[in-house]
Amino acid sequence: MRSTVFLLLALAALGATQEPQRGSVWPKPQSTVRFHNNGFVIVSINTFRFNVTRNKCDILSAALTRYYKYLSLEREAGYSERVNFRAGSNEVPLGEQPLSSNSSYRGRIDSLEVDLMARCEDTPYFGMDEHYELRVDSPDVPLGAKLVAHSIWGILRGLETFVQLAAPSADGTALHMSSCMISDYPRFPHRGLLVDTARHFMPIETLHKIIDGMEASKLNTFHWHIVDDQSFPYQSKLYPELSDKGAYNPLSHVYTQNDVKALIEYCRLRGIRVIPEFDTPGHTLSWGNSHPELLTKCYNSKSPLGPMDPTKKSTYRFIQNFFSEIAEVFPDRYFHVGGDEVSKDCWKSNPDINNWMRENNISGLYNKLESFYINKAVHLIYSLNMSTIVWQEVFDNGDTQLDNNTVVHIWKLGSFMEELRKTTSAGYMTLLSSCWYLDHLKSGGDWTEMYQCDPHNFDGTEEQKRLILGGEACMWSEFVDFTNVVPRVFPRASAVAERLWSDRSVKDIRDATQRLDEFRCRLLRRGVHAQPSRGPGYCPGEIF
């Protein structure tokens, strides 16, 4: 507790003495080389254009329109006031003197050459190539700018970096940009954000803002925890009664098929995967509002129904049909089947369950009953040519037959580094979330704890650590809704994003604090209402 207090005091002190780094990039690139004695160029938004020199597609066209808008927003931030920018190794030198008298001034650039070296892929996927190289006034591109990538996903990440390099001039008439070369790629292939839309319904417009923040943070996976005990907002084609009786309001608090399709498209255009989670056999009370036969009847509980009944063949017929629909609606090859926090009390109370267990020689072994269900569920998903992600309890139970493509998702806070060692020792690909629960709010400065949590900080071989795919920040929604979810997520999820993108050696809190402060201001300019990342301060160009 004392160390946390000291850290927060240090952040507040830093906020009082330091200004944000301008023209800095978040997440920090793998390699940045400055040229011409920290030279800089001017970008005039009125004449600037993107030049596509090779392959084109709808994703690229939409991105160029979007990022031109973002460039314009950066310039507008300098219009409302004259801003003095702190000089530093990671910033362009800005000041009040005429450009002609500034020895670091190199000239103007009017375009960014965008070179997509391969044909566009249509849909983001696990393991997609996100590498890019960006040159601004480098020796081989004097007074020019060039972005090169082998994939459209690398182009998207490079466009984000290009815009973040821009900082408004002192008079707000143009943008300054460092003369540099950036070679960049992610450290981990899976960099996600889980959003729970069941405890509180999140309107599509709110989800768009969250996805905008993900794009800026270079997060690439939207884990949609779409239903749970409390509500079933997904409007199924096969079983519309699930949301008719399971949603908070079947008219306003549902995601129609068109809503889901549009959200997947919104993510696709930003290089973000959408992984659906329909958690079973627990967390399913809302299913029972329309299909009580799926759930177990409880005999000694306040709730009349409990988890799904694993002993009925009809349960598996239903989920096979439902999972088949999900496989058609969501294009990603991964399906998060859940499997966490399954209460055994209801099963223990039910005589039919216990008779079935005796007949199948697992009497009293309720973990084996759970594993029986999970085995059935995951093999149904395998039959749909999809791979599964499961919460750690499925692995911990020890009886589930998981194939080598299964991903184990670690969420319990306890000894999660030991859990990482165990899952990777068993040969399973693994995701981490334990230290990145965004609903656990201490203060605005608690992003530093998330920033310092590294998925490789466990005792394991290099081969084991290669099985760590990355991780996810998790925004459970018991105490957030559309009014406060965005500032609760950002910029704290962005701290996780840098941990998963940047080199492991990037861990300087002081440097990160200054860069995150500017990144948070950039999010505000884009309409993503991120909360302050440290103590007192303000964002240049704030307009109310």
Image (spheres, helix red, strand yellow):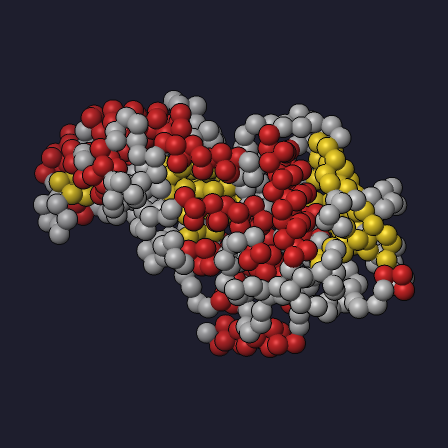
Give whichever of 417, 177 is nearer the camera: 177
Taking the image as shown, residue 67 lies to the left or right of residue 329, namely: right
Q: Residue at x 58, y 56 (%)?
A: 525
Q: Quadrant of residue 95?
A: bottom right
Q: Residue at x 50, y 41 (%)?
A: 221
In the displayed structure, 49 sits above or below 533; it is above
Total number of numbered labels?
0
In the displayed structure, 541 sits above or below 388; it is below
Give whichever of 306, 89 is nearer the camera: 89
Q: Residue at x 16, y 33 (%)?
A: 293
In the displayed structure, 543 sits above or below 119; it is below
Q: Residue at x 60, y 36 (%)?
A: 62
How far across and how far down the image is residue 265, in percent? 49, 34
Taking the image as shown, residue 181 lies to the left or right of residue 162, namely: right
**Residue 115 in view of the camera:** yes
Give whichever of 541, 293 is nearer the camera: 541
How far across and how far down the image is residue 226, in percent? 35, 42
Taking the image as shown, residue 27 lies to the left or right of residue 107, namely: left
Give whichever of 246, 355 is nearer the camera: 246
**Residue 279 in view of the camera:** no
How far across and how far down the image is residue 108, in percent? 83, 50
How far across and how far down the image is residue 342, in percent? 27, 45
Q: Quadrant of residue 77?
A: bottom right
